[in-house]
Amino acid sequence: MDTIFALSSGRAPAAISIIRISGERAHDAASRIVGALPEARTVAVRELRHPKSGERLDEALVLRFDAPASSTGEDSVEFQCHGGRAVVDAVLSALAAIDGLRLAEPGEFTRRAFENGRIDLTEAEGLADLIEAQTESQRKAALAHAEGGLRKQIEEWRRRLVELSAVAERAIEYDEEDSPIDPALVAGIEALVAELRDWLARPRVEPLKDGVRVVIAGPPNAGKSSLLNAIAGADRAIVTDIPGTTRDHIEMPLSLSGIPILLTDTAGLREAEDRIEEVGVVRAQALIGTADIVLWLGDVSEAPSHPRIVQVRAKADLPERANAPADAIAVSSVTGAGITALLERVAMLAKSVLPGEGALALNRRQAFHLGEAAEALSAPVEDEVLIAESLRAARSAFDRLTGRAGVEDVLDALFSRFCLGK
């Protein structure tokens, strides 16, 4: 495998830049630039010189790590040098001049850590989310995964699966035919299934990462676009008195009490008068189905079925619209009345779809494989042979969850999210 190198800190210029080298030739390559390397996991000041010309490039702190006790599981070295562009370019050019070294691809250091067993796939996903985190809640949720929280939980579930499998295999080998199934085996499987179902029922991580999707819906001319503009504080959507003005959905990200929100205006729901409007209506219906929260601006009797729906009486500044039903929030996009109350209701509902602060939350891929394990264990209990097979299927699902097997199709997509040098 090639020895790789890259700038792993922020783009120059900076006060300090960190350049990483990893692979079987890392120590040899680094010693050609700095001379004698320090002891493993210690730091020393060294001059950096070009390996061919001997030209002095910089003076830097040098750290050496020996396999497998490094972040990648390989021999590695870090240079902490001055962060000017010319210095960084000179050091990178010097490394490129050494045979057997090449510039790392985005995410390649982390991918090697995964392939060498230093982290599992759930930790790699957490690390990618940590790099992309923009809010404190996102940071805490990502850190819980990056530090191995889910990996440790899966290891505990897998340990229990192995113990249950041992009981089942022993029964197949030694129990007499038609003997009753061990009640402890059945109870152990049922307890594990209940635990997995509980995890699957928890709030997912996607609303925290992508924003809680709040969809404004209702018939034409109900005030949907005006409401979006009032919340945005700008004319984001076209507003006219002509029914069917909005033909496609308009999305606006915002932060509400520190909660990421994706506010979406949709086409008015009615019998479409042309093909373009029909497409908009179909999209609006689909968005309602995938929404975390729906703001309904139509008649209560026509409201869609949704677990988190807020009835909104828009245009409350008009005399004929002043009296809102008891369960509706009256708002005026003209005067701003009721907007604060509406946003407070949205924030309260949004918290219910988000994971708790710092709690472990599953993403779609993780939930899918956890669901596979729960489904396998929920198979009818008829004899030990079938039970043993169900337990094997559950272990395979856990292996796909942690990246031990069957995940080649997701690796490229995941590690491409990482920056160069990570």
Image: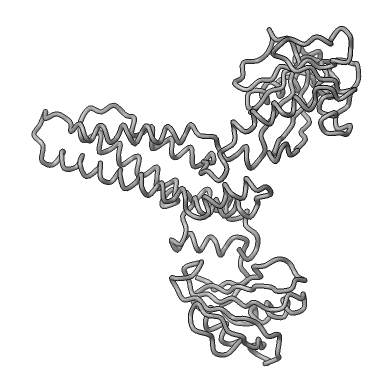
Q: Position of residue 55 (x, y in %)?
A: 71, 91
Asked whether, in this view, residue 402 is left or right of residue 245, the answer is left
- 28 and 186: which is toward the camera: 186
Q: Look at 53% across and 78% down and name the residue there.
A: 64
- 133 and 220: which is toward the camera: 133
Name, please, the residue furthest toward the bottom. 54
Quarter of the rendering containing residue 17: bottom right
Asked whether, in this view, residue 91 is left or right of residue 111, the answer is right
Q: Position of residue 196 (x, y in %)?
A: 40, 36
Seen in the picture, residue 313 relative to 59 is either above or below; the reply is above
Seen in the picture, residue 184 relative to 37 is either above or below; the reply is above
Q: Look at 48% across and 71% down and name the residue there.
A: 74
For the rendered model, the colour scheme is one colour
Name, please, the residue furthest toward the left. 176
Q: Look at 60% across and 87% down and name the residue there.
A: 34
Quarter of the rendering containing residue 299: top right
Q: Look at 89% across and 31% down and name the residue there.
A: 235
Q: Position of residue 37 (x, y in %)?
A: 54, 86
- 171 and 96: which is toward the camera: 171
Asked whether, in this view, residue 285 is left or right of residue 371, the answer is right
Asked whether, in this view, residue 61 is left or right of residue 169, the answer is right
Quarter of the rendering containing residue 189: top left
Q: Position of residue 290 (x, y in %)?
A: 63, 27
